Image: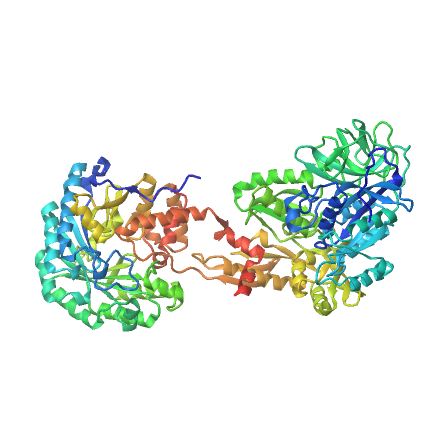
Amino acid sequence: MPGALPIADPAPLDGALPASVAVDSANRDWSVYIHVPFCRVRCGYCDFNTYTGEELRGAKRSDYATEAIAEIEQASAVLTQAGVAPRKASTVFFGGGTPTLLPVSDLTRMLAAARDTWGFMPDVEVTTEANPDSVDRDYLLALKEAGFTRVSFGMQSAVPHVLATLERTHDPERVPFVVEWARDVGLDVSLDLIYGTPGESLADWERSLDYAIAQNPDHISAYALIIETGTKLAAQIKRGDVAPVNDDLQADMYELADAKLAAAGYDWYEVSNWAKRDENPEISHASRHNLGYWLGNDWWGVGPGAHSHVGGVRWWNVKHPAAYADRIAAGHSPGAGRETLADSSKYLEHVLLRARVRNGLTTATLDADGRTAVAGLIADELVDARAAIGGTINLTLKGRLLADAVVRRLLADAPV
Amino acid sequence: MSPRASYTLEPASTDPAFIRNFCIIAHIDHGKSTLADRMLSVTGVVSDRDMRAQYLDRMDIERERGITIKSQAVRMPWALTDENGKEQSYALNMIDTPGHVDFTYEVSRSLAACEGAILLVDAAQGIEAQTLANLYLAMENDLTIIPVLNKIDLPAADPDKYAEEIAGLIGCDPASVLRVSGKTGVGVPELLDEATRLIPAPVGDADAPARAMIFDSVYDAYRGVITYVRMIDGKLSPREKVMMMSTKSAHELLEIGVSAPEPTPTKGLGVGEVGYLITGVKDVRLSKVGDTVTNFAKPSSVPLQGYSEPKPMVFSGLYPIDGSDYPVLREALDKLKLSDAALVYEPETSVALGFGFRCGFLGLLHLEIVRERLEREFNLDMIATAPSVIYEVMGDDKKFTTVTNPSEFPGGKIASVSEPMVKASILTPKDFVGTVMELCQSRRGTMQGMEYVGTDRVELHYTMPLGEIVFDFFDHLKSRTQGYASLDYEPSGDQEADLVKVDILLQGEAVDAFSAIVHRDKAYAYGVLMTERLKNLIPRQQFEVPIQAAIGARIIARESIRAMRKDVLAKCYGGDISRKRKLLEKQKEGKKRMKMVGRVEVPQSAFIAALSGEVEAGKEKK
C-alpha cells in the first residue's frame, strides 16, 4: 500500500502559481472572498477562524483593512505573473468572524481595492455577513452606497434557549428591524438559521422557521448544527452537560424546513440553501458567490486562514492574524499550504460539490461507473428520475438528506 | 537419600532389569512440569546453570500457558544403594504426557509406553476430573501408581486431607502418599527412590524381531520428524532400515538416540528402552502415534496393539481478517500439519468472511492452540466461526449427509439428525452441585450418577451432546463455580435429536457465518440473540434492513435496522472543500473493509464482534 500522501505542499514565499492555472482561465468566473477574523465573543459551537480581542496577540483590528488590501495587490501580481487572464469579479463576499465589527469605512475601503484591482462585472454581487446586533441603518446605508448588494444576517434561531445554548448574544427581537433597514436601503437580505441544537425541539425549530419566513427575506440558509471537535459545545457534550445531536431529529427538522420554505415560495438550490422565487423568472436570489465554490470557479481568499482556488490549485493562508500581519509586513505571501489537484481529485470534487446543487451535475460528466450507479439511486428515490433521464442529477428530499451517501455511491469505483 | 548415580548405563546395552519407565499424570497447573524440571536437576542431567523453567516444554505457547501439548521423553540416571552399601545404577525414562482432555489418545499411547505412573496432585486443590480420567486409563493398563502430593510448600496445602482422598481412590494407605515440592525440591529424591523400587522393570524378547511403539512424533524444522519410541522386543541400530507396520513404509535410520534431555545419538535401542528415531521424513503423518516400528530385513508379523487414527471432533472455519493473508494462512496450516497429525482442514468460502479453511480439531483446546500458533508463529489475524460438531442428517429420501458445517445442512424435509454424544465427568466442590446440574440440564445433559470424591467434592456423570459442550459450556462451568469445577469427556456414540438449522438473514439473504445447528427448543433463543447482536453492530444503511432468524422458510425472530435518514454535511464552502474531499477519500478506503451481504454494507468488525459475542460482554461491563 502506498504511504499516506502529505496533507499538502508548502506554499512558496512569493505565492507564485504554476502556469497551469492560466489554462482556460478567461472562461471561468472570478470571485473574491475577504475574511474578517474578528468577533466580540466566540460562540460555543463555532470553529471558524476568528479571534476575540484577547486572542489577537498584538495583531490590531485597526490595521487589518490595510493588510488585506496589501494581499489584494499581491494577488493581482501573482495572477498576472502566472498568465491568468484579467477578469472582472462576478462576486465579492465578506465573511467572518463578524465583518461588521469593523468600521464600515474599513469594509468599503477593502471593497474599493478589489474594484480598483480587477474591476467588477455590471451585475456584481457583493455580500457581507452581519450580526443583527452589530449593524444599524446608517451602517447598512453606507454599505449600499459603497456598492454592497446583499447582506446575510446570522439569525440562527428565534428561540432564546436555543440562542443561549449556541451562545449567541443577539436579541431575536432585533432581527425584524435590521431586515427592514437593509431592505429599505436596497440590499438583498439573507437569513442564516441553525437547526438541531441540543435541547431544540421540533416545535422550537418551527417557531424559528415561521419567524424567519415572516421577515420575507430573499434567501434563507438552514444548517444542521455540526459539532466540531475542539469547540466548547463538543466538550460540553463529551462531558454529558449537553445532550448530543440527534440525527433523526435533524432529519425531521430538515423535512419541516423544506416543506415550510417551499410553501412560502423558497426553492432549494443547494442542500442547505433556499432562494425566494421572484416574479421575474430571470431574477434569481441564490447566492452566486457560494454557487461559485460548488461549480468549481476561481476565487481568491484574502485574509488569515482564507482558502483560494485558481485553476486546480487550492491554497490557504496562515491562520492567525498576527502571523498574517507579519507575512504581509515582510512582503511575503501569507500562503501556508497548497495542493495541486490531480485529475482524480478534480473529478471527486466535481461530483461531491456539484451533486449538492440543484441542476449542478450532469450525467454526461460522470464516468461509466458513476452513470451506472445513477440507476440504483433512482430506484432508491435518492435522485429525481425525470431529471436523470434528462441528463441532470437532482437530489430528491430524501437524497438531499443522504447527499454524502449519494456521492459515495456515484464515486464508489472512482480511483482516489 | 540416594546420591546421584556415579556411573550411567549405556543405552543399547542396558539390562532391562535396570530400566524404569514412568509417566506423570497430573492436571494442568498441578506442577507436573516443575516437578519434571526438578527431577532433571536432581539427577544431574541438566546443570543448574542450564535449567530454565519447564525445560521440557518446547513450544512458547506451552511455556506461557503452563501446559504440555506434545509429550517428550527423557532418560535420567539414578542409583539405589543396597543394605551392603553397593550402588546400583538405573536408567529412568520419564515420559511427559499431555494433560488435557483433547489429547486423551496421545495420553493413552504415553501410558502404554510405561510400567509406572506418578499420580501428581496439588496438595491445595486435590484431584481433578481429567486426572481421574487419566488415572483410570493408567490403572486399566496395569501401571504401578506412585501417588504424590505436590506443592506442600503452599500455605493453603492440606496434604492430610488430600492423602485421604487419594488413598480412597486407589486403595492405598494414606501414609504411603509421598509429599513433595517441585518448587523447592523437597521430597524429590525420595520420590525417585520410591519409583525406582516400586515400578516394575520392562520385559521383552531381546532376540525377537524389533517392535517399538511410537508414542510421539514431532516435527523439527532442521531434522524433520523426530519419532519417540518405546522398545518392546528386539533391537534397533543406527543406519539400519526400519518399517512402519501400519503403512509398510520403509525408512533408513539416520539417527537413533535418547533424550538426556538434549538428543544424544546412541548405538541403538534395546528391550525396554525409550528413545528417538530420525529418518529424514518430513511429515508426521508418515510416523503415526501408536504405530509399530520393526526391522525391515527381519520384520515382525504382529504389530503392537493400539494404533487408531486421530478423529477430529470439533470443526470451525478459520478466516484471515485481511483477505490478502489467505495464502499465508494456507502455508501456515501446511506447516502446522507437519507437527500436528490431528489437524485436518480444507478450503472454504464464506459470503461474510471471504476465503478461509474449514478445520477439524480434537477438541476446543486443540482449536485454541492451533489458532494461537497461527497468530503467533505466522503473524496472522484471524476470526474463527462458532465451533461445530459432526451431524449425520437423513433426508426424507433416506439419503445420509455428513454435516460439519451448517452450510452443508440439506434443505427440504429432514427425517432425522443424529449428533455425537459424550460422557462428561464434572468434578466440583459440593456447594456448586446444584448450579452445575442446572447448567448440564440446560445443555441437554442426562445425569448418569454422582459420587463423592473425598468429603467435600462431587463427581457428576452426564451424557451430553458434544455440540453443547463446544458452545461455551466450559466458560459457563468455570464462571458458575468460581473456577473450581473441572471437566473431562469422552466420546460416547451418536444419538438422534430434534435439531434444526437456524439461518440468520440480512435483508432476506442468509449470512453463512451465522447459521447454526441447534436443538429446536433453543432455536428461538439463538435467533433472538443473533438478530439483536447484529442490530446493534451493523450501521444504519440508506434503507431499512430486516434481520431475521429462520428455520427453513419459517421466520422465528425478527429485528430491523432503521434506515439512516441523514448523511450529509450541512456546510461545504470554500474552506471546507479540501477537508471534505480528504474525508471522502478516507471513506472510500474504509469501504474496502466492508463486506457486502446483498446490498447491505457490513463492516468486518461487526461480523467478528457478532461471532465472538463481544456485544453482550460489553454490556455486562457497563
Q: Is residue A374 visible?
A: no
Task: Residue B479: give x, y in percent of width and height.
Answer: 65, 63
**Residue that protrudes farthest toward the left in the picture:** A145
Front residue of this view, candidates B450 and B309: B450
Tell me the quarter of the picture where residue B173 sits: bottom right
| Residue plotted at (35% across, 42% down) | A6
Task: Residue B461: give x, y in percent of width and height.
Answer: 78, 62
Coloration of the structure image: rainbow
Left-right relation of A265 to B35:
left
Tell me the quarter of the picture where residue A165 sits: bottom left
Q: Is residue B443 visible?
A: yes
**Residue that protrudes farthest toward the front in the picture:** B85
Q: How many marks?
A: 0
Task: Residue A161: give x, y in percent of width and height.
Answer: 30, 72
Q: Is residue B356 above or below residue A228?
A: above
Front residue of this view, candidates B410 and B597: B597
Left-right relation of B579 to B344:
left
| Residue plotted at (67% across, 52% down) | B364
Front residue of this view, candidates A30 and B361: B361
Task: Residue A211: give x, y in percent of width and height.
Answer: 24, 70
